[in-house]
Amino acid sequence: MSDNSAAINTNAQSPAEVEQDGTRAKAHPINDQIAADRYAATRAAHARNSTGLRFNKIVPPGSV
């Protein structure tokens, strides 16, 4: 997908909530991260100028 895939993989391997010296850190749920990654990928796909499907009229040589 996008470069967010590496961040999702890193977050999936780390703990969901951490507390150190009275400071807490909590990560977003993995489902929200996956949804954000899919959203970013679809936005990038829609930003391209290619149509994905083209129609061309094929004219064989020698036809009138």
Image (tube, rainbow, N blue to C red):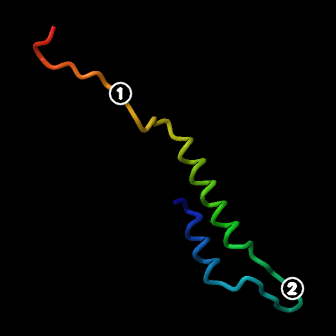
Side (left or right) of 48 relative to 29: left
Image position of 32 with respect to 25: above or below: above
Taking depth in this image into account, of 39 and 3 the one nearest to the observer is: 39
Mark 1 surroundings: few (<14), some (14-19) or many (≥20) residues within 10 A: few
Q: Residue at x 73, y 82 (%)?
A: 16
Q: Quadrant of residue 62?
A: top left
Query: Quick check: 17 left or right of 63?
Result: right
Against 48, residue 38 (above or below) is below
- Is the C terminus in the top left, top right, bottom left or bottom right quadrant? top left
* SS state under label 1: loop
Name the residue tied to disc 1.
55
**Position of 59 compared to 48: left or right?**
left
Query: Is residue 33 or residue 24 the one in the foreground?
Result: 33
Residue 57 lies in quadrant: top left
| Mark 2 element type | strand
Q: Residue at x 78, y 87 (%)?
A: 18
Q: Residue at x 67, y 69 (%)?
A: 31
Tell me which residue sits at (82%, 89%) in the image. Answer: 19
Residue at the spot of label 2:
23
Instruction: Report how far apart the C-alphas of labels 2 and 1 lie in the structure.
Output: 60 Å
Callout 2, which amino acid?
Thr
